[in-house]
Image (tube, rainbow, N blue to C red):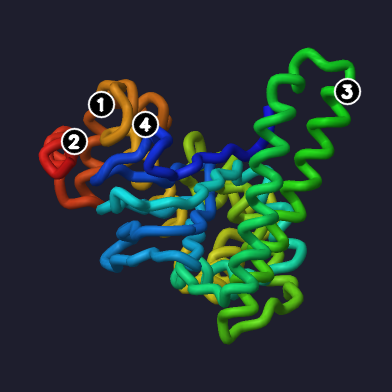
Amino acid sequence: MLPFRFHPIRPDVVHPFHAGQIISTIELCGVFLCRQGHVEVSFGDQTYHIRRGDIYIYTPSTLVRLLRISDDAEGLLVEVQVSYLLPIIYKVVSVENMLWIRQHPCVSLPEDTFNHLDGVLDALARRADEELPRLTTSPRKNLLTELLKSMGHTAAMETLDAYFANRPIAPQPQSKHEIVFSQFMLNLFRHYRMQRDVAFYADLQHMAPRYFSTIIRQQSKKTPLQWIIEMVITEAKLLLEDSELSIKEIATALNFPTQSFFGKYFKQYVGVGPREYRTLMKNFS
């Protein structure tokens, strides 16, 4: 299957989103381009009002919540697998700039830039919709899959170009320490469910844990342990809110030895236990 998928937002199309819902996931990052109307989302303690001509980029391990979508809202949400996208963007975007996107996810585009990016994303969405039924039956399925992935690569570059052309920051080449951080993030996405030990990630890069931690903190203002905790807690929250899994099943999925241990871990960093959190979020939505 393709490493990206499209959700058109239009008054005449039933979409899977509702107020109060978390629209981000651990494995997916994405971009929403607004063509009409108004969408309101929250990330952390910030609220973003997205209108025509705006793009909103959400990165992995972020809890982006949909607060409101107007009846006349139109746009396109593109969800992309992290494992596909990160190796692409880390070739051209520094760690500093990736963190900038994380902290400044919304940007307003000039009309000509907006129209160009809208055309690029729409063309990819239409081509993917047209070819998707053939990807399992056609003798050309491998060719078609690689063709669509290549178009997705181009769309990702166009999106980043549109973003940085309208932000006072330019992509910079990566230093050796930035490469260490980039690799840590890739490894973290692959292993965080099973591995919460900083030494494990340091060993993957043949580094001493203390030196490794110093580099990660210098690059991101967070320690490796803080990144690991954030990833685990983010997915725990997602599973508590958007799945029917029991708390014991969630503890198992995140490789905690017991439900009790998971509950203490979750409460330590969230302030309430998993069961109370699930109840609070159900009442919120």
Q: Nearer the viewer, mark 4 or mark 1?
A: 1
Q: Which residue is mark 2?
A: 278
**Camera-side residue of 184 and 20:** 20
First reached walking from the N terminus: tag 1 or tag 3: 3
Q: Which residue is mark 1?
A: 247
Q: Quadrant of the C terminus?
A: top left
Classify 43 as above or below 168.
Answer: above
User: Is the C-beta separation of discs 2 and 1 under 8 Å?
Assistant: yes
Q: Nearer the viewer, mark 2 or mark 1?
A: 2
SS class, disc 2: helix
Q: Is residue 262 visible?
A: no
- Please indicate whether residue 27 sits to the left or right of residue 207 in the image: left
- Residue 5, position as x, y percentages in the image: 59, 37
SS class, disc 1: helix
Q: Which mark is residue 140?
A: 3
Image point 50% across, 67% down: which residue? 53
Q: Amino acid at mark 4?
A: Phe
The residue carrying pointer 4 sits among few (fewer than 14), some (14 to 19) or many (20 or more) residues within 10 Å by Cα, namely some
- Residue 261, position as x, y percentages in the image: 27, 34
